[in-house]
Amino acid sequence: MWWKTHKKTVLAATLVVVILAAAFWFGGSAPGSQGWTMDNAQAAQEEREQENASPAEETSASEEETAQAQQASAEEVSDNQQDQPTSSAAPAEKPTMEIDPATGKDQYQTDPVPEGKPLPVEPEDTEVTATTHTCTLSISCEKILENMDLCNPEKVELVPEDGWLLEPTTVTFYEGESVFNVLQRTCKQQGIHMEFEDTPMYHSAYIEGIGNLYEFDVGELSGWMYSVNGWFPNYGCSRYQLQNGDVICWVYTCDLGKDVGRETA
């Protein structure tokens, strides 16, 4: 009896439920209706985890690059410090002169240097630096004018009327250079002929001729000599190390230096 009484109501309710279920399924709200699956959900979750992990990885890489840059900078600073000259270098040793008691001379046949005069400095023991100084250089053959009767006839025309091959001139030299270095360079710059010979026995260059005027051109006692600050050194010009302000005079003597002011023992 009940079914007959409520049959229409039950059928109507069932129909409503069926319609609602169909609408839910085909309306796009059911799982898979938009291509979403459990596998895709898991992949999306992993992607989100990777995205969340990326900042940490980037930070780690940045920290590593920073550490490498700091290490490279430290190594560069260390290299620069090694390249810088140190102030602890020992000062240059002052020249000494060892005299052989048997001969009274040094190993290059040099007599003892008078007290207060500069000692010879061996070229291989000196260091030429970039520091510049000045000195005065002159070249004179004035004494030939007083001995023209002894002068080689072929050389007469080479003697200047005033006796100067080079009047006193201020020249620049580098710290550590010798009298020979300055003469050689200045003659080349001024276009003045100069010829020399290395003499191992005396460990110095020997000046044979300047301005094409050679030793023995004005007698057997003639030739070139040099003085520094008025003193005629008793050693070769390659061994005389110059100081700032020195005055160098190259002179042609006709009497072994007596006529140009050289003092003899």
Image: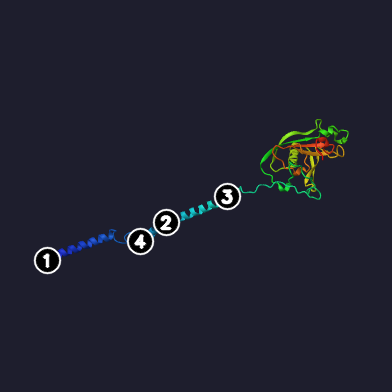
Query: Which of the 4 image quadrants contains residue 172?
Result: top right
In the rendered structure, the answer to whether residue 126 lies left or right of residue 141 reads: left
Residue type at numbered disc 3: Gln
Rendered location of residue 104, percent (x, y)? 80, 48
Viewer-side label of 2, 3? 3
Q: Residue at x 34, y 63 (%)?
A: 38
**Could you tell me residue 21's position as x and y percent?**
24, 62
Crowding at mark 2 (Cα within 10 Å: few <14, some 14-19, many 20+): few
For marks 4 and 2, the one nearer the N-term is: 4
Q: Position of residue 54 (x, y in %)?
A: 42, 56
Q: Which is more foreground, mark 4 or mark 2?
A: 2
Q: Amino acid at mark 1?
A: Thr
Front one among 6 and 90: 90
Amino acid type assigned to the residue bearing label 2 in the image = Ala
Q: Which residue is mark 1?
A: 5
Q: Secondary structure at mark 4?
A: helix
For the residues labelled 4 and 1, the Cα–Cα distance comes to 50 Å
Kindly identify which residue carries mark 4: 41
Say left or right for 19 vs 69: left
Quarter of the rendering occupied by the N terminus: bottom left
Q: Where the C terminus falls, by quadrant?
A: top right
Q: Earlier in the sequence, mark 4 or mark 1?
A: 1
Name the residue nearer the viewer: 157 or 116. 116
Q: Of marks 1 and 3, which one's residue comes earlier in the chain?
A: 1
Q: Secondary structure at mark 3?
A: helix
Q: According to the image, label 3 marks what residue?
A: 81
Q: Are marks 1 and 3 in contact (CB under 8 Å)?
A: no
SS label for mark 1: helix
Residue occupied by mark 2? 56
Q: Residues within 10 Å of mark 1 (few under 14, many from 20)?
A: few
Q: Nearer the viewer, mark 2 or mark 1?
A: 2
- Nearer to us: label 1 or label 3: 3
